[in-house]
Image (spheres, rainbow, N blue to C red):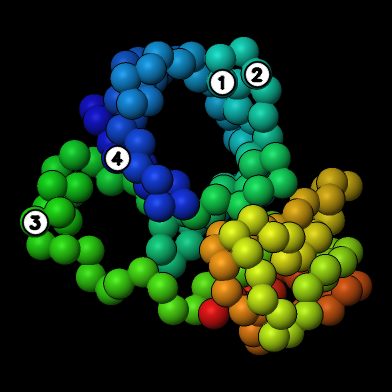
């Protein structure tokens, strides 16, 4: 089965070969993954390299925190992708982006302030969870708005931390 995965606005064609092999844009990869706990934490073995990922569903698709970077992703099968390309995707991209906590944790630092201009990839919040510090980065350029947390706050999974407009 083929799927189209869009990660931070970049499209990838993913073909599931079998339970342990996939093709991504035609390149073969070995893959093994397992849920680590009741939390949305997954252990991922990709081409012999080990990763830990936090994965949770959002209003737009999926949010994946991997190696300190937050990725927005959508995954659709070939049929759905064809339908969307014919009928359109709906709302235009843009507007306000809400940074949400990918897991429960403690806000360790907020290196930006309300009204500050940020670039794609700038660190917005440092969140500590499971004794690891995770840098939550901006997925696009814009201006920080609506700060909803402060350093030292405990947050829940999917809690809105701030927004970028």
Q: Residues within 10 Å of mark 4 (few under 14, many from 20)?
A: many
Instruction: Name the foreground residue: 75 vs 27.
Output: 27
Task: Please identify the residue farthest to the left as the structure is shown.
Answer: 86
Q: Which numbered marker is on residue 86? A: 3
Counting residues from the start of the chain, the first of labels 1 and 3 encountered is: 1
Q: What is the quadrant of residue 35 in the picture? A: top right
Which residue in the structure is indicated by mark 4?
4
For discs 3 and 2, the disc positioned in front in the rendered view:
3
- Between the C-alphas of marks 4 and 2, the distance is 23 Å
On residue 49, the disc is 2
Asked if residue 47 shows in the view, the reply is yes
Residue at horizontal 77 percent and vertical 51 percent from the top = 134
Mark 2 surroundings within 10 Å by alpha-carbon count, few (fewer than 14), some (14 through 19), many (20 or more): few
Crowdedness near tag 3: few (<14), some (14–19) or many (≥20) residues, C-alpha within 10 Å: few
Among the 4 quarters of the image, the one containing residue 105? bottom right
Whether pointer 4 and pointer 2 mark residues with C-beta atoms closer than 8 Å, the reply is: no
In this rendering, would 143 be left or right of 83?
right
Which of pointers 4 and 2 lies earlier in the amino acid sequence?
A: 4
- Separation (CA) of disc 4 from disc 1: 19 Å
The residue that disc 1 covers is 46
Question: What secondary structure is marked by label 2?
Answer: strand
Name which of mark 4 and mark 3 comes first in the sequence.
4
Question: How far is disc 1 from disc 2 in space, using C-alphas?
Answer: 5 Å
Query: How far, Cα to Cα, is label 4 from label 3?
Result: 15 Å
Asked whether residue 36 is in view, the answer is no
Residue 152 image offset from top left, x and y in percent: 91, 72
Residue contact at pointers 1 and 2, CB within 8 angstroms: yes
Q: Residue 157 vs residue 83: left or right?
A: right
Residue occupying image coordinates x 33% and y 26%: 25
Residue found 22% across the figure and 63% down from its top: 89
């Amino acid at each position: 089965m083929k799927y189209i995965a869009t990660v931070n606005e970049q499209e990838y064609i993913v073909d599931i070969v079998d339970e342990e092999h996939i093709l991504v844009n035609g390149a073969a990869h070995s893959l093994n993954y397992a849920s680590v706990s009741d939390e949305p934490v997954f252990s991922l073995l990709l081409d012999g390299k080990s990763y830990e990922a936090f994965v949770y569903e959002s209003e737009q698709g999926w949010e994946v925190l991997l190696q300190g970077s937050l990725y927005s992703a959508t995954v659709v099968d070939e049929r759905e992708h064809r339908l969307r390309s014919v009928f359109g995707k709906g709302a235009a991209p843009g507007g306000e982006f809400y940074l949400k906590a990918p897991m429960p944790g403690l806000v360790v630092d907020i290196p930006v302030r309300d009204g500050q201009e940020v670039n794609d990839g700038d660190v917005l919040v440092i969140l500590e969870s499971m004794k690891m510090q995770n840098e939550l980065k901006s997925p696009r350029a814009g201006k920080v708005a609506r700060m909803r947390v402060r350093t030292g706050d405990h947050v829940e999974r999917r809690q809105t931390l701030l927004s970028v407009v």
